[in-house]
Image (tube, rainbow, N blue to C red):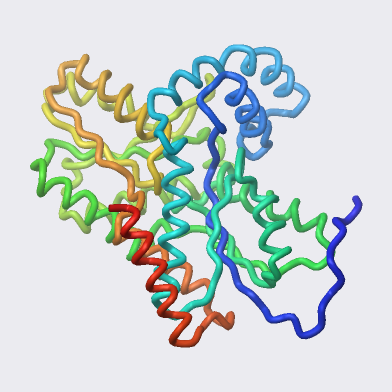
């Protein structure tokens, strides 16, 4: 393996620190060709699909990439925003607001975002940070619960990039924050505010992204961390065990995945006489296809068709102030020991950046 060509080392170069907020990814546009490129990269990751490569390559390129892109493109088109993919829009806003919050707290750090699949790629953003002289980089995945299919894949991308670099920056990684008090509080505030405006449901359904059940038996902590998040959130909301339900969505293929499955659970609740359900997706920090189309559209239709009377989807944390503050505290904790403190005038600049970002949000 050959190394990338890099500028000559400059003695006395000041250290710079960055935070790279990493999310799953999104196609560049809601079209079949764009979905084909995106799905080939996403489903081609051995962390995502653990079928032996020769067999999976034939299935992926011989069947899936011939049939699924057009169907997926229609789904993306149904939730696409004027600014682009919702996931990309929210992740970009989170990175901007995070930089402002850290600046307000006196930290001089660069904050960027990258996608594990699609654009902006992790490698391209890491290249930029390195070229700009950043010598310390905190990798912050947008996944509160650790899974080899998501968090570990982000780390893989960083390691692959680092293998091509001669002078590797000092790297730190955030593994999980499923039980972080700030994260739980931000979720609780989001839900409580929704209930203040719309009343309370008969049942709150907490839907997490699903993974194959075999990952649990192979040692992946994801299942346990989802349950802990749900338990802590229910306690914070004052819910009894019969007032909420944890489920897993986005099943793919014929293998057994973590259960109970979201849509069948919603159908069962409707058939059992539950009139109103509210659904929240705590594992997603920004709204995306899996929340806006799969839950807010498909799951809603399934519940109402089965006899339910009212279905409400509670939006993700997105750019809610409580979440951005919690994200800043999380980043600040993992930046500990790195010299990021700035002078008063630089901190004031960070405050102005935050104010501008909040103004743009309005």
- x, y percentage for residue 217? 55, 41
- x, y percentage for residue 87? 45, 41
Of 171 and 213, nearer the camera is 171
Residue sitting at 49 percent across and 87 percent down?
A: 343
Residue sitting at 42 percent across and 52 percent down?
A: 93
Q: Which image quadrant for residue 166?
A: bottom right
Of 228 and 149, nearer the camera is 149
Which residue lies most toward the right here?
A: 2
Of 38 and 294, nearer the camera is 38
Q: Is residue 113 above or below residue 243?
A: below
- x, y percentage for residue 293? 37, 27
Residue sitting at 91 percent across and 52 percent down?
A: 2
> Seen in the image, is 119 located left or right of residue 314?
right
- x, y percentage for residue 44? 68, 31
Q: Is residue 47 above or below residue 63?
A: below
> Seen in the image, is 217 located left or right of residue 321?
right
Count of labels in the image: 0
Residue sitting at 26 percent across and 26 percent down?
A: 266
């Amino acid at each position: 393996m050959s190394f990338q060509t890099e500028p000559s080392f400059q003695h006395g170069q000041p250290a710079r620190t960055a935070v790279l907020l990493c999310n799953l990814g999104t196609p560049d546009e809601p079209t079949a060709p764009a979905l084909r490129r995106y799905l080939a990269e996403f489903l081609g990751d051995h962390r995502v699909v653990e079928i032996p490569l020769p067999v999976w390559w034939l299935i992926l390129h011989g069947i899936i990439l011939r049939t699924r892109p057009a169907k997926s493109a229609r789904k993306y088109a149904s939730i696409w925003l004027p600014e682009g993919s919702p996931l990309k829009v929210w992740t970009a806003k989170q990175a901007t607001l995070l930089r402002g919050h850290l600046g307000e707290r006196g930290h001089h750090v660069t904050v960027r975002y990258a996608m594990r699949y699609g654009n902006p790629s992790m490698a391209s953003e890491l290249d930029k940070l390195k070229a700009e002289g950043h010598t310390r980089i905190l990798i912050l995945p947008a996944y509160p619960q650790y899974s080899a299919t998501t968090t570990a894949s982000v780390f893989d991308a960083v390691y692959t990039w680092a293998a091509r670099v001669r002078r590797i920056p000092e790297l730190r990684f955030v593994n999980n924050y499923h039980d972080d008090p700030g994260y739980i509080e931000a979720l609780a505030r989001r839900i409580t505010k929704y209930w203040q405006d719309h009343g309370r449901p008969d049942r709150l359904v907490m839907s997490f992204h699903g993974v194959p059940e075999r990952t649990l038996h192979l040692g992946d902590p994801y299942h346990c961390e989802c349950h802990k998040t749900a338990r802590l959130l229910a306690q914070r909301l004052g819910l009894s065990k019969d007032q909420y339900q944890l489920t897993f969505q986005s099943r793919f293929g014929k293998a057994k995945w973590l259960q109970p499955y979201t849509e069948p659970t919603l159908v069962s609740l409707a058939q059992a006489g539950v009139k109103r359900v509210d659904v929240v997706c705590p594992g997603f920090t920004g709204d995306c296809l899996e929340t806006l189309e799969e839950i807010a559209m498909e799951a809603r239709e399934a519940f109402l068709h089965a006899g339910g009377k009212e279905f409400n989807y509670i939006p993700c944390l997105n750019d809610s102030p409580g979440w951005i503050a919690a994200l800043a505290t999380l980043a600040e904790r993992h930046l500990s020991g790195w010299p990021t403190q700035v002078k008063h005038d630089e901190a004031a600049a960070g405050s102005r950046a935050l104010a501008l970002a909040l103004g743009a949000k309005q």
